[in-house]
Amino acid sequence: MQYADFIDINTVKPDFAMPFNMRVVDDAIMIANDFGDFAFLTPSEFQSFVAGDIAPGDELYERLKAKSFIASEADDNELVSRYFQRKSFLHAGPTLHAFVLTERCNHGCQYCHSSIVGMSRMDTDMTVEVARRAVDFAFQTTSPWMTIEFQGGEPTANWETLQFVVEYAQEKNKIAKKELSFALVTNFSLMTDERLEFLIANRVQLCTSLDGPADLHNKTRIFHDGNSHEITLEWIHKVNARYIELGLDPILYRVEALPTITRHSLPRYREIIDHYVDQGCRAVFLRVLDPFGFAASTRRTLGYTIDEFLEFYRNSVDYIIELNKQGVEVMERLAAIMLNKMIAHNDPNYLDLRSPGGAVIGQMGYHPDGSIYSSDEGRMVAAMGDDIFRLGDTENQNYGDIIGGDVARSLILASTNDGHPRCASCVYKVYCGQQPEYNYKTQGSLFGRMVDSTWCRKHMGIFDYLSHRLKNATKEEMEIFERWTINRRQDHFVQDTE
């Protein structure tokens, strides 16, 4: 739909309204501005608005004034402050530093987006010497807070280097005094009580994959040395019990578990969500298949269309909302992130949905050989034979060279919504973002073509769904959405600086 479908262009009063974008949602026109405000207007209200045919005291005028859509009523200082807050992530360097400790893995997950190797390939481990240089490099970030995330392969297969990074970074932080945290993405198959105690003692946050009930999880997460689902649940419960023993709030502190949605998952959304609830999880992050690594070659057997995923997603969140009405407090993580942006005027700095995007200036990926990439996704593209997202390495480049280099500049331009013709005029522009690595892998261009981009269709579809739910929400449903936007700090995972 275009403006001309609703109005006579000759009646538009161009200096009456603040700049905005529009989209039809149900039977209404949704408008949104660059400060995060949105409103739903009937066609007649929209006509009056763009014609400037409303006056102070009118219900519509006062409603739009409160949301900064009336140019003459805009408070410039307030809007500058709000825009500054939304873009505050630009005032510091990368916060997420993904350390790929090894490419070895004992699982054969059919959808794996990493290019893994067998457990005998010790040559793919990050050495302590490379890890030291990587930590030194990461600490050069201008950000006052930073997370070192251990990835793989299965990162616990290189336990010596994991321990070294934790202890060395803690020592460095006694001088740097950053808000430092660690996160470990693990399948738990190599976990031991001794290792868990090290992780608990050093406050390393734990994240794992849980694809649903046992048959669904084990169908794609192939593990020949045991029952992957059984092992995962055993350690989830053990870790959560240790948090309770430490006196931590069990609502806030628990293992983060994530499902990857395959074709087999689509008809089983209720079972997946119920399984998460049964394990005490309070959030489910419904992740679409990646186009990287093994996932690119197994898409024919595990994949689906974006429309099929969106139907699955809508059904899932509808069900989650119904569970909340029954007193079960569980949320869908991506919906919560988007709602934070839409109704809480808060940007949680989710790297995939910000403009400019997270590549280089929000995150960096560190390969076992010391190479530095724009992100973990950039490193995955390299594992598939293309080094376009390689920024340099920990031995021959310094932080200033990389952060101000040509690759970084290109990725910043490519991930800025205002630089994309379709994004610049999209009603969701202020809430959305780009991932150049995804664009490049799926369309051969850093900028991508949003008109036929699966990235765009996925996010626009979810925003459309949430906009529909917000427009028609009851008081009870709005309270549920507002509860999903409450963000509590997990201070226990922040490292001491003394």
Image (cartoon, helix red, strand yellow):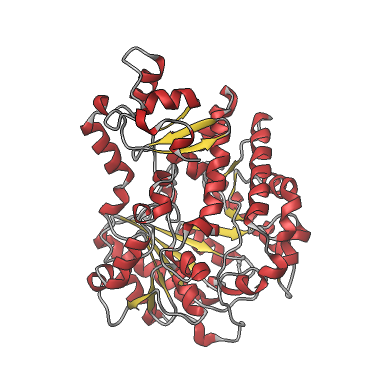
- Which residue appears at 60% of the width and 86% of the height? 120
- Marker count (numbered): 0
Name the image quarter holding residue 164. Answer: bottom left
Looking at the image, is 494 positioned above or below residue 477? below
Who is closer to the viewer here, 318 or 482?
Answer: 318
Left or right of 65 on screen, residue 104: right
- Measuring from the top left, give residue 301's x and y in whole percent: 72, 68
- Measuring from the top left, give residue 136's x and y in whole percent: 30, 72
**Residue located farthest toward the right when viewing the structure as drawn:** 215
Who is closer to the viewer here, 116 or 378?
Answer: 378
Name the image quarter holding residue 231. Answer: bottom right
Taking the image as drawn, is residue 116 in sight? yes
- Measuring from the top left, give residue 158's x and y in whole percent: 51, 76
Looking at the image, is 480 positioned above or below residue 361? above
- Quarter holding the C terminus is bottom left
Who is closer to the viewer here, 398 or 38?
Answer: 38
Taking the image as drawn, is residue 206 in sight? no
Left or right of 157 on screen, residue 486: left
Looking at the image, is 199 positioned above or below residue 3? below
- Which residue appears at 43% of the width and 34% of the height? 31
Who is closer to the viewer here, 10 or 331?
Answer: 10
**Residue located farthest toward the top when viewing the structure as drawn:** 57
- Measuring from the top left, give residue 487's x and y in whole percent: 45, 40
